[in-house]
Image: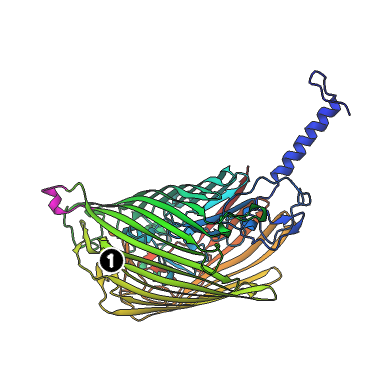
Amino acid sequence: MTNYCPHKSIAPSRWLMTFALVVWSSLSYAQMRTEDIYDRGERRRDIPATGIIDPDAPVDSIGGKKERRQKRPIESYLFVDSVRNLNAFSWRHNPYNNNVVRVDIDTMLSGFNRDYIFFQNESIGNVYLGNLGGAVMPLNFFDRRQASPFTFLDAYSTYLYTPDNVQYYNARRPFSQLSFFMSGQSKRAEEQLRVLHSQNISPSSSINLTYRNNGTRGMYNNQKSKDKNLSIAFAHTGPRYTIHGGYIYNMGDIQENGGLVDDREVTDTVVDLPQNLKMNLKDARNVFKGNTLYYTQTYGIPLVSPDSSLGETIADVPAVFIGNAFNFTKFRKTYTDTRSSVEEGFYQNWYVNPSQSADSIAEHEIDVRLFAQIQPYNRNGVFGTIDGGVGFRNESFYNFNLSDYLSPSKGGDKRNSLYVYANAGGRVSRYLSWSGRFRYTPVGYRNQDMMIGGNIELSAYIKNKPLSLTADVQYGMETPSYWDEHYFSNHYAWNNSFAKENETRFSVRLTVPSIGVEAGMWQSLLGNRVYYDASGMPAQHGGTLSVTGVSLRKDFRWRGLHLNNRVLLQWSTAEEVVSVPMLSANATYFYEFSVVKNVLRLQLGVDAYYNTSYYGPGYNPATMQFYNQREVKTGNYLWMDAFLSGKWKRVRLLVKLQHFNYELFGGRRYFQTAHYPLNRRMLKFGVSWNFYD
């Protein structure tokens, strides 16, 4: 063999061979899948298909049958070997018990037709104002979340990034995703932009950027909205030390039209142009902004040295973990309008200025915690982990009052609380796992607030096919929101002293993935429930009410035909306090097939939503709150979308005719919120592109 000499020229044939090899290697490398669920061309059954690869997709023909050099895997006690060896995976972190939950990386074709963020995660339906970026509330009472403690943003919690819902990624190769959706005419266009980038700094350290921009110019007058959400998160999950943290920015700029002056312009007549409909408000606007800085870090001290020759980590031996957490969050909201642009009688009060409004409120929170976690045997033992901690919470509330004219308040209303908490969990075998949680506030503003709950999961395997039964029970008692008790603005003012709210909730769920069945039941007993009544003011129900829910999901599949069905039944014993539709249903029917094998796969189908008639909520622009109106009923309308979605290598494409049954069948009662009509028929286009390296 001739040794290489830098002083000798390379023959043209060698240049050509070298160039061809570089090109071939680049093309092969560009086609590599990020999720490593294939090993030498055979599907690995022991690794769940929750990452970038579609589990039904064929084996990559380039490099799929050749063993290639793998980068060093992540070193972390939080993940089992099968996860650590993946090329890419994602998770969420619980800052209270130092545990993680695997979540999907959104690259699948299934569900891509649901572009609205509040219809993702298999939502069965939502109350919303018709415009993307506007207020939203789930039809399912048990899915309704609070932006606690920032309850003035409850109606926008679906859009917000928070430390609890930030998604962390670990990818051996840089991974990026760009998604864009657009519909409607340019003057009334609706647009969505999503950007994701994940980059590993080391095998166990990563930084992730996610950005969302949801907005519309509005099909109806004064309906323009825009929500921007940015999360810059970092994670290090090493053999002993872990840290999760980041920065979050949330912003919303929403024009408020107050809904229709007269619903009959929609229900009883046909107005050719939606912009000709008369609305209650012409220049009202809500703007909110929020910033969050947070981190949670832990350090593990093994009580017995792990045996590296057996592949043991600190998760396999008795150990103690100590850590601390920090969270600083602030939000500010401003509402403006002018009297000349408000329909007479829409607002009855003008307390501060008789001609215009400029109401602002703000809230800051600092939460600091110290905690310890004991691992008596190993992390998957009967007593896997037992942990507890102490936290300090400082809350500052800012709201202009008439008294501020005489002595302006710059410091706001500051409230402090000291709380303790504990968690425990374990696994008896692969058939039984359990967990418990407790939190109590002995001192401060939220004195005597408490929460205690537990969870148990039973698993069985029939012909190696799993089924699980999960039961959860929780009791909580908490201080009502500051803003439900104290508020002053140009249109609304109150000063309440409410008793503590309490709730006992029980749920049970049966899941059989192999036959596409999921059934569940929820029961909630609510005491001293605070709600917004028909006048749009906060009130407290003095007794106890119950809300019950029963759900069933059944997915049928025959070859390429998919018939996915979900039904939810709900009952409330006090509809004037908690109003829910008795029946909500969602059906997604589509046919999936390959146009070009291993290259292009399509889904052609319809997505339908329905709920029975009930007193659906109204919406108050001045307070940004849904309230329990008793004037008109909403629902009893079938909403249908027709879609064609496809996956071509790394690209997903969508063409959707949204609300295609408008004026075809179903009538004209397309309202989910009282006096707010949903959008008419629109043609939508979407694309999502994954980039590796």
Who's the residue at 37% across and 59% down the image? Answer: 147
Q: Looking at this view, is 392 or 588 the one in front?
A: 392
Residue 60 placed where, x, y %?
Answer: 74, 52
Location of mark 1 (residue): 479
Q: Amino acid at mark 1?
A: Thr
Q: Position of residue 557 (x, y in %)?
A: 66, 72
Left or right relative to 412: residue 556: right
Image height of 200 relative to 541, above or below: above
In the rendered image, the quadrant that contains the C terminus is top right
Question: Residue lying farthest left?
Answer: 406
Res 391 → quadrant: bottom left
Compare residues 447 and 336 and report the one nearer the observer: 447
Magenta stretch encompasses residue 407: yes
Q: Residue furthest front?
A: 304
Counting labels gives 1
Relative depth, front residue between 224 and 133: 133
Front-lying residue, 117 or 151 = 151
Residue furthest to the bottom in view is 573
| Residue stretch in magenta | 398-408
Residue occupying image coordinates x 15% and y 47% = 408
Residue 269 visible? The answer is no
Residue 84 in sight here? yes
* Residue at x-position 67% and y-position 45%: 71
Relative placement, left or right, of 56 versus 535 is right
Question: For residue 20, what is the image quadrant?
Answer: top right
Q: Residues within 10 Å of mark 1 (few under 14, many from 20)?
A: some
Residue 31: image x %, image y %?
71, 46
Q: Is residue 193 magenta?
A: no
- Residue 574 percent location from the top left of the image: 32, 79
Is 544 above or below relative to 105? below
